[in-house]
Image (tube, rainbow, N blue to C red):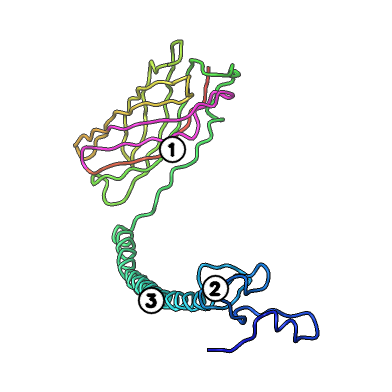
Amino acid sequence: MKTTLPWFLTFLIGCSAPTLQEGFYECQAATDCPQDWSCHPDGFCYSEQPLTVPGEDAGTDSGIGEDAGTDSGADAGVDSGVDANIEQDAGADANIEPDSGVDAGTDVDAGTDAGCTPIEPQVIDPAPLRGTAPHPGGCVPGTYRVAFDGSYTSPAFGACPVHISGGMDFTLAGTGEVIAITASSVTASIGNQSLLLTVTGALDCATNQFEGTLNGSYEINGTSHDLLGSIAAPLDIVTGDLTNGSWSLREASSASGSGSWAAGWTL
């Protein structure tokens, strides 16, 4: 047990203003302590009034700190382990790359085996398809001159796609928001064979979008092949052109084709 003097004796003995020390002066009650100080359960004076003795708090906090350190260590260990496993998974994923090589090889083999030259559809300019009369603007009935281009793949022509192209005129007639086709016939070539297509459809003036269906057939080696497909294009309300159109065709077998088209308003 430490031996101390009462705080007022320290003041009397000192030659200058006292420096009061926390937890140094013995007491049995607050009246034994300097003014506004309190007597704590350990029998010493303190300037503040904590619920517990500061020394003991520090020890408790220190213990908590140790726990925190333990938790931190444990968490760090677990997290680090998990992250490491994830990295290993990433490595495992990287092992998938050889499979990708296999797929790539499959694609190359497909092209090599077939020995085919890709056929890209042409971008068709509708300006040469227009008539001489100026378009009145907006969504109006009239006759359209069409050109289309693309490719078609069918066992009837072999393993490689063949070029398909052609043209036609169709007339949109009627009033209101929907203007329908009244006459349509397509004369086209598919490979070195003739292709006959019929177009049905309508121009929706609310959305300025043309949508239709294609029906047709071609004959090769004495066998007729029926086709079914779709055709669509947006309307340019300034020029009256149907531009940046797309079409697709297919047969009951695995044969199919697609391409581009455009149409110019003629009258």
Q: Is residue 249 left or right of residue 132?
A: left
In this view, the residue in front, 164 or 44, is: 44
Mark drawn on residue 260: 1
Q: Is residue 136 above or below residue 64?
A: above
Left or right of 196: which side holds 22?
right
Q: Read off the residue under disc 3.
A: 74
Q: Is label 3 or label 2 in front? A: 2
| Disc nearer the start of the sequence (2/1) | 2
Circle 2: is it few (<14), some (14-19), or many (20+) Cα within 10 Å? many
Q: Is residue 142 above or below residue 10?
A: above
In the rendered image, residue 99, in percent from the top left (x then y), is placed at 30, 68
Residue 42, above or below 134: below
Callout 2 amino acid: His
* Residue 227 pos. (x, y %): 27, 33
Q: Is residue 214 magenta?
A: no
- Magenta range is 228-253
In the image, what residue type sits under mark 1?
Ser
Quick one: SS at disc 1? strand
**In the foreground, 97 or 12:** 12
How far apart are labels 2 and 1 at the CA level?
94 Å
- Residue at the image point whose x is 33% and y is 39% from the top: 190
Q: Main secondary structure of the magenta part?
A: strand
Question: Does dot 3 land on a helix, a strand or a loop?
Answer: helix
Question: Residue visible at 33% across and 66% down?
Answer: 100
Residue in the picture at 27% in, 46% down: 157
**Would you identify the image quadrant in which residue 89 lies?**
bottom left
Secondary structure found at label 2: loop
Q: In the rendered image, which residue does mark 2 sit on?
A: 40
Nearer-N-terminus badge (1/3): 3
